[in-house]
Amino acid sequence: MKSVLGNLVLFLVSVTVALLAAEFAARIFLDPVDYLMPTLVADDFLDHRVVGHTGAHDAWGFRNREVPSRAEIVCIGDSMTYGVAARARDSWPAELAKMRGTTTYNMSLGGYGPIQYLYLMRTQAVELHPGIVIVGLYLGNDLVDAYNVVHSHKNWSSYETRDLADLPPQLIYSRRTGKFLGGLRDWLSRRSVLYVLVTQLPFFNFVRERETAGYEGSDTRIEYRDTTHHEIFYLDSRLRPLDLTDPRINAGLEITEHVMTDMSSAAKRSAIRLIIAVIPTKERVYGDVLNQAGYLTGSSGHGGTELLASALRDEDTVRETIVSFLRQQQIEFVDPLPALSQGVAQQDLYPLTDGHPNSAGYRVIASSIARYLGGGAQP
């Protein structure tokens, strides 16, 4: 019995030492900011923010090695600008820095929207004395985020639309509660590079797919596969942040236009060149591919046709409205959609179940912006 117990203790000690050694090696050869989950806290103006120096983020709580004294370009946005689903060095702001050879600071975080972009521009971005500020306006959920922040934070009540005062304060697209061992997994995600590295292996696509299927009503989905592509799109109407039949989305659009006007004024006061990058959804980027496969005509033999067509129509309407507004206000903008749509003809630019681009997708966005900065002509 003592021999068995001794062997068990020796085994556990050996495993522990091996895991600690592997964790140490992972932190040497890998950038922890790509793996560790930072600590989030509530904020009266930003709604939430990252605590500085947690999850290998910088002193301001953003996904950079350090806060520079000056940055020629500051990129502000949500998870699409942060670079979710890719390494920090593969986010589009980082790729843009490589292409331009300029100091570029990534000032973005998942869950942020137009209100946060304006606040960050007025406060922290100006401290870096940038010549250019690029705001990544994501059509997928920025209108929702604008509505939610204005209708739930008194500090932004001046942007509230009075005719919608009786509507619910927030528009939240819920999912079924929890994930398997969620507490433990979150704890490990904050502390172990090795754990996060292992969960990014292709095998875990199965786990991610099963958990993503936990969205309420997500029985309507498209799984598209051919010799070049393999992607999954979720089209439940309750998960569509651009449903123009919901008056709250239209209110979010009005708020966003108001905010962009204020951004432009703030930029002019600080002698900053403001550029809006209008970032499309994964569904819109793959629209041509799915259309050719019959998903917009019903000839594919699969479900999701009506929801997909409606989602793409709504996004196109919102894009046209925003682009028209930007032109009217003489605010510079870049639309990476044509380049992304062309790019997916050759390869997948998004992970299997994620709406964020992969490293190749972020590179296409950066290239579109770099080309615009090089030429300066309005797209």
Image (spheres, grey):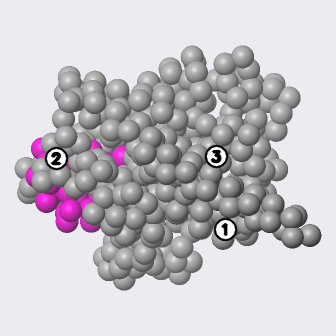
Location of residue 364 with respect to 352 vertically, above or below: above
For label 3, the crowd category at 10 Å Cα-Cα, with few meaning under 14, some 14 to 19 and many 20 or more, is few
Q: Where is mark 1, residue-wise?
A: 184
**x 57%, y 38%: residue:** 282
Badge 2 marks a residue whose secondary structure is loop
> How far, Cα to Cα, is label 3 from label 1?
15 Å
Residue 4, picture quadrant: bottom right
In the rendered structure, find residue 71 and report the number of the disc placed on it: 2
Badge 3 marks a residue whose secondary structure is helix
For label 2, the crowd category at 10 Å Cα-Cα, with few meaning under 14, some 14 to 19 and many 20 or more, is many
Q: Amino acid at mark 1?
A: Leu
Say which label, 2 or 3, has the lower sequence index: 2
Say which label, 3 or 1, has the lower sequence index: 1
> How far, Cα to Cα, is label 2 from label 1?
38 Å
**x 36%, y 53%: residue:** 63
Location of residue 10 with respect to 212 vertically, above or below: below
The residue range painted magenta reads 118-137
* Residue contact between numbered discs 3 and 1, judged by CB atoms under 8 Å: no
